[in-house]
Amino acid sequence: MAPEEVVLLDDAHRPVGTALKAEVHTEDTPLHLAFSCYVLDDDGRLLLTRRALGKKTWPGVWTNSFCGHPGPGEEFAATIARRAGEELGFTVTDVTEVLPEFRYRAVDSSGIVENEFCPVYVARATGRPSPLASEVAETAWITPEQLFTAAEAAPFLLSPWLLEQIADERLRRALAGPAASGQ
């Protein structure tokens, strides 16, 4: 298996090269392509994951269902399907892009920087998670409202990208939509 590469971007989000994922996250991380996905079950509950304690950035922090980096030439749909299987051990359906232009930069307490152009998606779970231990320490199914309340009460427990993403009303509506409609 070849080492995983990430796509480096210019400020207009155009590809300008690649870097090894294992080497790209430093104190001076270049802008690169990523995605975030929030997974809902049939009852409208949201899957939160706690990042593995061995993660280079934000170890042990609760975050969205899963994230990843498209490889060179890889479409988002393929990346999302691949990472759902690798990281959570299931497939997802009804993948919908919600925040197509999301970009963030955050610095971990260790000084490591995340610097990503990171479109945000919502998807539907097809089973129960069986997470990869090197990626996910634990999981929890909660209502979107419980997430919003937790973000207000204890933002330090959550990843900075999750906090920025759920501040956007478009994502809040997408997460609340299935529960509100009874689907």
Image (cartoon, grey):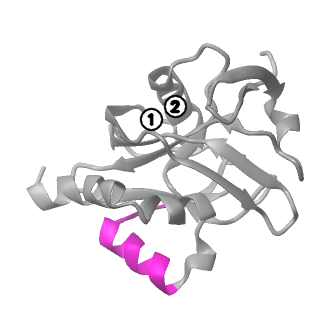
Residue at image location 49% in from the left, 26% down from the top: 76
Residue at image location 66% in from the left, 43% down from the top: 116
102 with respect to 41 (left or right): right
Which residue bears the numbered disc 1?
90
Can residue 132 be seen from the camera position used here? yes
Q: Closest to the observer: 76 or 52?
A: 76
Q: Are marks 2 and 1 in contact (CB under 8 Å)?
A: yes
Magenta stretch holds residue 19:
no
Q: Which residues are magenta?
A: 140-153
Amino acid carrying mark 1 in the image: Phe
Farthest residue to the left: give it: 181
Q: Closest to the observer: 150 or 106?
A: 106
Q: Identify the element where label 1 is drawn.
A: loop
CA neighbours of label 2 inside 10 A, class few (<14), some (14 to 19), many (20+): some
Q: Is residue 132 above or below residue 173?
A: above
Q: Closest to the observer: 99 or 35?
A: 99
Magenta stretch holds residue 151:
yes
Amino acid carrying mark 2 in the image: Gly
Disc assigned to residue 85? 2
Give percent across and percent down for residue 60: 69, 65
Give percent across and percent down for residue 117: 60, 40
Q: Is residue 14 above or below residue 36?
A: above
Give percent across and percent down for residue 104: 62, 52
Task: Of the two numbered discs 2 and 1 on the same chain, state the one appearing first in sequence.
Answer: 2
Magenta portion: prevailing SS class? helix
Residue 19, quarter of picture = top right
Residue at image location 61% in from the left, 26% down from the top: 70
15 with respect to 57 (left or right): left
CA neighbours of label 1 inside 10 A, class few (<14), some (14 to 19), many (20+): some
